[in-house]
Amino acid sequence: MGVLVGNAIADIAGLYAAHGGWLRDWLRRQTRCPQRAADLAQDTFCRLLERRPALPDDAKRYLATVARRLLIDDIRAREVERAYLDVLGDRYGTADHLTPERITEAVQLLDGILRLLDTLPAMTRQAFMLRRLEGMSHADIATALGLSDRTVKRYIAAAYAHCYALAYGEA
Amino acid sequence: MPAAAVPDSEPTAEIVARAAHWAALLDDADVSRQVCDACERWCGQDPRHRVALERMRGLAARFDRLDGVGREALTVAAARRARRGLRPAIAALAVLFLVVGGGWLTLPPLLAPLFPDHRTGIGERRTLALADGSELVLDGNSAVAVDLSSGVRRITLFQGQVQAVVARDVARPFTVATTDGTATALGTAFIVRKQADGTRVTVVESHVQVCADEQNVDCRNLSAGQRALITRAGIQRLSDIDPRAAAAWARGWLEADDMALTDLLAELNRQRQRPIRFDPVSLAGRRVTGSFPLDDTERAAQALAAATGLGLTRTADGDLVLSARR
């Protein structure tokens, strides 16, 4: 790790001293789990140390914003993990044959894809998922959704453009 | 296929929109030769065109990396979320985040500069009918990119094994390329396998030219039943093989003719999520002859145990173990 600018560390340390306890309490109320709350609070400060942002005047509110983001990430990842383990259970009765690393890797991949899908408008997402996950042809998707072929193509193009903007920024 | 060179300037909004249109056209189940050629021409006009399109295809390829469980899990997770709706508090926060700082929503960088068009999971074999009439059989855990744009027929094998049954077209040589070298044919059937130590080429029918470099300087001609290993050091001939047996995996069979037992077990394990366990030292030197089903490796293991007189047991946590102890 590189040498941190002294001021930034001091700021973050000050933030921790002033609001660390408050943040853990807030997260405990949100998660109803002390362990998760402690982990998330720690992650929040780690984020700040990694990125060393210029702290705004209202530092407490800023802290809460960062913590909320991490909390949402955490909730989503848990949902995806639950779905993954459920499907594994249905198919094989157990997930015991997979190493934890492999499950984590799969969940991260799924989580990334799901985030991407979540940001698409409903019809675009539906068309894109039928193509990508079910392997349906555009003509079959058009029939299934009651659309014209041309409209399906337009949705698929919109999905590509949207994903591109998300991954590489607006051109 | 080399990774696209990143052009000096990023694709413009107009290029991205146009690339999305092409990506949608190429996205369909069947894409005509005309569309492929037209798209290739568009890509050739400006390096930014190709970069934009390849990035989009790469994003779609994230889905192709999913196995059956992953696909189903994604469908389940998306359906649950849609059914329940985003919890209002979370939905409101999500909106806030998009406004506050989209940077946090940015996807992780794409790992591979090369995006496979087709990928198989462990134990999955797939036959692809190509637009030129050729056929590709992808072995398990394999990934290829297919380029049939005008003038070339080029398959890039990133990992795993592929059998090409090539439709004759003298004007367009058919090449399977790996990072080690190429195998080129005009009308024939051959197998290319990317291994850790190089690329193995086996000719099933007719002739194939293998080259260890793109300039086609270090090349050898192989005929049916001949094999070669392409490495950084060049091309090395391997012992000849019965071509019918070599191609059997594409039909779902492993044909062993006096094959080392440990090699055979390694082949079976390539098809399995949970490997058959064995001690390579105590099984060294044993050889096997017979046909074993790749689609049912449990049955293959039983047949193997019967043929060799070894014991096949199952551990408490469900692993199969092949050992000399009965």
Image (tube, coloured by chain):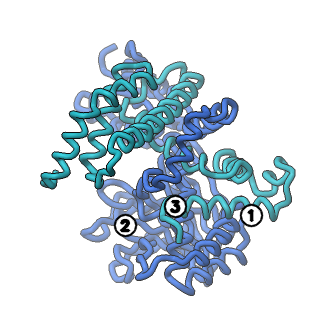
Chain colours: A cyan, B blue
Chain identifier of the residue bearing label 3 in the image: B
Viewer-closest of B242 and B14: B14
Residues behind callouts 1 and 2 on a single chain: no
Question: Is A27 placed left or right of B75 in the picture?
Answer: left
Residue B41 or A171: which is nearer the viewer? Answer: A171
Residue at the disc numbered 2: B179
Q: With respect to residue B105, does A148 lie above or below? A: below
Alpha-carbon span between mark 1 and mark 2: 37 Å
Disc 3 to disc 2, C-alpha distance: 20 Å
Q: Residue, x 37% and y 67% (percent of image)?
A: B179
**Comparing marks 1 and 3, which lies closer to the viewer?**
1
- The verdict on a common chain for dots 1 and 3 is no
Q: Is residue B213 left or right of residue B21?
A: left
Is residue B254 something one can see in this rendering? no
Specify the amino acid type for callout 1.
Arg
In the depicted view, which residue is nearer to us: B315 or B259?
B315
Q: Position of residue B109 (x, y in %)?
A: 41, 57
User: What residue is shown with label 3?
Assistant: B58
The image quarter containing residue A43 is top left
Report the disc number at residue A154: 1
Q: Quadrant of the C terminus of chain B?
A: top left
**Position of B221 relative to B283 (above/below):** below
Q: CA distance from mark 1 to mark 3?
A: 19 Å
Mark 3 or mark 2: whose residue is earlier in sequence: 3
| Image position of B162 (left or right of A141) | left
Looking at the rendered structure, the secondary structure element under dot 2 is loop
Is residue B234 placed above or below B94 in the rendered structure?
Answer: below
Q: Quadrant of residue A21?
A: top left
